[in-house]
Image (cartoon, helix red, strand yellow):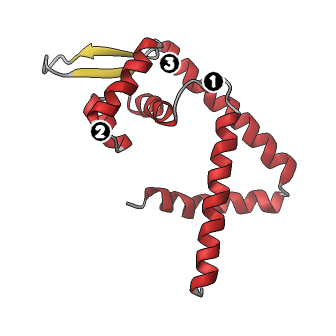
């Protein structure tokens, strides 16, 4: 692929993905008061059940200080709980509260419903199959360091 065509393709792909992310964010009225990083932090806690603040910061690629601010906000909303580590009393384990888990699942459900409807109403069966096939290379791109 020549450089101009490659550059145009990459730019168009980035634009479409960015616009899709913005649309998905708007489709969840439940958590509009949360930042993207706060939502992502909650998703990590849902996935891993318990994490140290430093682990969360590393996974989100932010400073420990920034993660501390995020955790303070989530704690104020009663979405997370801090528990002293049983093995090292200097460490605190972070996990989702039932309320935090419910909010996260509600947000995902709202977005999934919108995306399902959008795909069903705008894409042909062949286009839907193409989207499924595109998940493999898109996942590789997301996992690229």
User: Which is more N-terminal, label 1 or label 3?
Assistant: 3
Other-residue count near label 2 (Cα within 10 Å), few / some / many at <14 / 14–19 / ≥20: few
Give above or below for 65 relative to 135: above
Residue 61's label in the rendered image is none
Q: Is residue 65 left or right of residue 114?
A: left
Horizontal and vertical percent position of residue 73: 42, 19
Element type at marker 2? loop
Element type at marker 3? helix
Q: Nearer the viewer, residue 141 or 48?
A: 141
User: Which is more N-terminal, label 3 or label 2?
Assistant: 2
Give above or below for 66 relative to 3: above
Q: Nearer the viewer, residue 9 or 134?
A: 9
| Residue at position x 83%, y 55% in the image | 123
Horizontal and vertical percent position of residue 4: 61, 83
Q: Which quarter of the rendered picture does the C terminus lie within?
A: bottom left
Q: What residue is shown with label 2?
A: 63
Residue 100's label in the rendered image is 3
Q: Is residue 24 left or right of residue 58?
A: right
| Residue at position x 49%, y 61% in the image | 140
Q: Alpha-carbon distance for marks 2 and 1? A: 28 Å
Q: Is residue 111 left or right of residue 38?
A: right
Q: Which quarter of the rendered picture does the N terminus lie within?
A: bottom right
């Amino acid at each position: 692929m020549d450089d101009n065509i490659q550059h145009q393709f990459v730019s168009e792909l980035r634009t479409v993905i960015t616009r899709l992310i913005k649309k998905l964010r708007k489709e969840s009225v439940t958590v509009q008061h949360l930042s993207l990083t706060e939502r992502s932090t909650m998703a990590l806690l849902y996935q891993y059940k318990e994490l140290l603040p430093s682990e969360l910061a590393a996974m989100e690629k932010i400073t420990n200080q920034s993660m501390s601010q995020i955790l303070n906000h989530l704690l104020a909303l009663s979405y997370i709980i801090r528990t002293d580590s049983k093995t090292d009393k200097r460490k605190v384990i972070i996990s989702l509260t039932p309320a935090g888990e419910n909010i996260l699942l509600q947000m995902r459900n709202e977005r999934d419903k919108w995306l399902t409807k959008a795909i069903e109403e705008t894409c042909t069966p062949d286009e839907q199959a193409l989207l499924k096939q595109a998940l493999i290379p898109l996942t590789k791109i997301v996992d690229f360091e």
